[in-house]
Amino acid sequence: MTEITRRTPLGDSPRVGRRGANTRRKILDAALATFDEHGFHDTRIELIASAAGCSRPSFYQYFSSKDEVFWTLAGELAKELGKLSDSLVEVDAGRSGVGQLQIWLDELIELYEVFAGVFASFPSAAGEPTTSTHGPQIVAKRLGHAINTAIDLPSNAVPNAVGSITLTVIVRSLDFWRAGLGQLSQQRYVKGSAQTLHRLMHGPKPGINIGPVVARLATPEPDWPTLALERRDVSHPRGRATRQKLLAVGAEVLQSNGYHETHVDDIATGAGVSHGSLYHYFSSMDALLQELAENAVASVAEIIGLFPDQVDYEHVHHWLDIYFASYRSNGGVISAWREIKWENDELNRYSFDVALTMFDRLQRIVARRGFGDSTVDALALLALFEGVPFNTQTLDYASQSVAIDASTFLIQRAFFGQ
């Protein structure tokens, strides 16, 4: 058994036996479930202690904060991901390689179910200061490198960030699949995803990773959802300009601070108005956020409609330039959707309807290629368009130019088989 040290100054002896080790494990297991249910920001030490069946003082005998608990769990996840990375190097270029990837994805899903609370909380926890050696970049580095190494092309032909971006896409796609988007069985999801990964690694191979069309969309395109916004009448030109300034500053502050750390005073000060003046234009912070959200959705809808018919490097790269620029101007809002557990049923429905509508559009885009399972790959494409700009612009994992180069490569080779 690994020796556990009790935190000083509690207790006469810093060493604990099996009982102490069991208590520590109970705290970690309880934290996993609590992070999954409440998210990183809304998880409190009292909730973890209660779920573990221990007192708050008992919690502090083993951990200094919820952050330490989280990064301890992240370290455990890192070790398991490291084990998974080793098997990627041996993926065969033939049909057996697709089978190897199906086994690998089943193992990843099993790991995801165990560490769902850590996966779900990474975006929020990553923005917090930490001295942990198991930060998100460190956790992903080994697996991302393994994916890069497994790609069957000269190394100088593969953008360096493809591996880490592919990992982002896989994990975020798992989030969407687990939430019920596409209503796919695990068998179908794993089979389609394995073929996509195999195309990335070894290029398109008819009969191996290029299969027949699985299903066709017969339903008409749904309209993009809208919100019934409370818009306060502002008739004076100066007032309209102030209102627009508040919206612009709101998007900037949300992107830099995140939803939970953004306050009315931050936005009012940035816009050069008083705290009270903001409420002349918006009834609440959430009212301002709702309008920003609808503006962001309108922008995304327009850009998705411009996805190029020709999926060559120049057209895809140019389209991604436009998309990333739009995300930057609306990124605070889009990132905030990740953090909020809406208490308002209307907003819950709206956020899910937005995801469903974008998912539908992406299925139609992927279906143009004329092979494979467009439903599975639409989940992954949605994960790319939502997850990669977030990691690039909010978490600063890579430069935008590097992310766009890698995303272009991924879209061409993995999704469209070029």
Image (cartoon, rainbow, N blue to C red):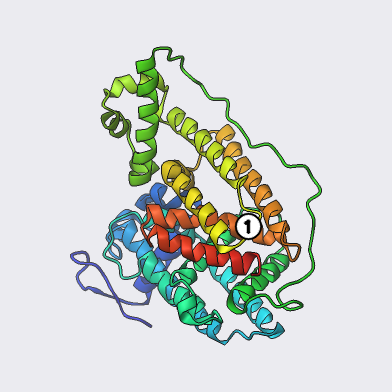
The residue under the point 45% across, 77% down is 145
Quarter occupied by residue 303: top right
Quarter occupied by residue 60: bottom left
Q: Quadrant of the C terminus?
A: bottom right
The residue under the point 51% across, 68% down is 167
Between residues 273 and 342, which one lies in front from this camera angle? 273
Quarter occupied by residue 110: bottom right
Position of residue 274 relative to residue 119, above or below, is above
Disc count in the image? Answer: 1
Between residues 327 and 417, which one lies in front from this camera angle? 417
Taking 343 as reference, is 328 left or right?
A: left
The residue under the point 46% across, 51% down is 324
Q: Which residue occupies the extreme front position in the image?
A: 314
The residue to which callout 1 is attached is 379
Residue 119 visible in image:
yes
Taking 229 as reference, is 103 left or right?
A: right
Q: Which residue occupies the extreme top position in the image?
A: 235
Taking 76 as reference, is 205 left or right?
A: right
What secondary structure is found at the residue carrying circle 1? helix
Q: Quadrant of the N terminus?
A: bottom left
Amino acid carrying label 1: it is: Leu
Percent coordinates x, y for residue 111 in the rendering: 54, 70
Percent coordinates x, y for residue 233 in the rendering: 46, 14
Percent coordinates x, y for residue 62 in the rendering: 30, 65
The residue under the point 39% across, 12% down is 236
